[in-house]
Image: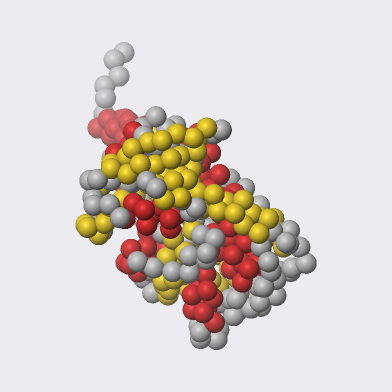
Amino acid sequence: MIRRSTPARLALAGVLLLGVVVLALWLIPSNEYIFLPDRARAVAPIVDVAGGKDPKDGGGIYFVDIFVRKATLLERLWPGIREGAQLVPASALLAPGTTDAERREADQRAMSQSQEVAAAVALRSAGYEVVTRPTGARIEQIDPHAPAAGELELGDVIVRADTSRVRGPADLRRAVGKHKPGAPVTLVVRRGDSQRRLVVRTRADPSQRGRAIIGVLVDQEATIKLPVRVKIRAGNIGGPSAGLAFALDVLEELGRDVDGGHRVAATGAMELDGSVTPIGGVRQKTIGVRRSGIDVFLVPAGENAAEARRYADGLRVVPVRSFQQALRALATLDEKT
């Protein structure tokens, strides 16, 4: 007997086939990455300060990260199915010759150093004497389209630019900024146990055409001796962007009412002088903070703050350039009602 296909059977087969296709698109990764929002998380549970204690005023300091992973084929075709999703080509995330594992390792190094810098800044603000020795600017991200991409590597520590010693990110910015875009700059970098001299061509900053940059994101490299034991258990979270949040919470646990009873989220890398420097993923972080019921979001001033405001949707965004400015901004917030 020959079974004839009926319209109902054909429709069912079509639905099943469509389901298989959608499932495959949902599960199979593409060659691109996707940035997604994550919720804001309280800092206090992961920070231990010797002699300190967690505040009980109903407020709190929060940090926020983003999810970074390979986009599925479905997300590649329709990134708008997730709010805040941003597709990023692998070439924009990984410098030439860099693997995912190397990127994660660099993120972990950045997180470890940012914790020490944050603790040092907070303890100094509390009146402690902290011994620090800034030793350079460590490369955390490289623009794969910049001339530096073929010369520098993640984890390199820049210790000299031309004839100037580089003790941190600010020194590097000043030295490179003396050049006209397109002119070469001579860098001395520490890579592992050796030093090497590299000549890297500058380019114009897209946001400030007359300013020269080399297309890297750097963080503070330093030797730090803390007078008080501070332990931060950040798990597998990487990168330096939680530095400001860590510093605010350390000071809070030392007994200063930093948050004033508000739920405060903060993002921004910290330098030893207390400067707050730009970070990435602001769109996703703003959406994550907004979803978490936070009262106020501290963000590095400039482009980061401008982008945060575009996605705030009622969330209060406060731009800051330094740790002390962040403390002053929080001190002037209206009392929680």
Q: Residue at x 47, y 45 (%)?
A: 159
Figure quadrant of residue 12: top left
Tell me: residue 302, above or below residue 84.
below
Question: Whole-percent x and y of residue 39?
Answer: 51, 59
Q: Residue furthest right?
A: 51
Question: Do we see residue 322 in this rendering?
Answer: yes
Residue sitting at x 37%, y 57%: 174
Quadrant holding the C terminus: bottom right
Residue 50 coordinates in the image, percent (x, y): 76, 63
Q: Is residue 321 above or below residue 99?
A: below
Give the residue drawn at x 44%, y 61%.
277
Looking at the image, residue 128 sits to the left or right of residue 193; the answer is right
Let me know if residue 69 appears in the view: no
Residue 254, picture quadrant = bottom right
Q: Nearer the viewer, residue 302 or 40?
A: 302
Residue occupying the far front of the picture: 163
Q: Which residue occupies the foreground of this view, 251 or 1?
A: 251
Residue 185 appears left or right of 63? left
The answer to whether 327 appears left or right of 71 in the picture is right
Q: Nearer the viewer, residue 304 or 153?
A: 153
Q: Picture coordinates of residue 226 (x, y %)?
A: 69, 58
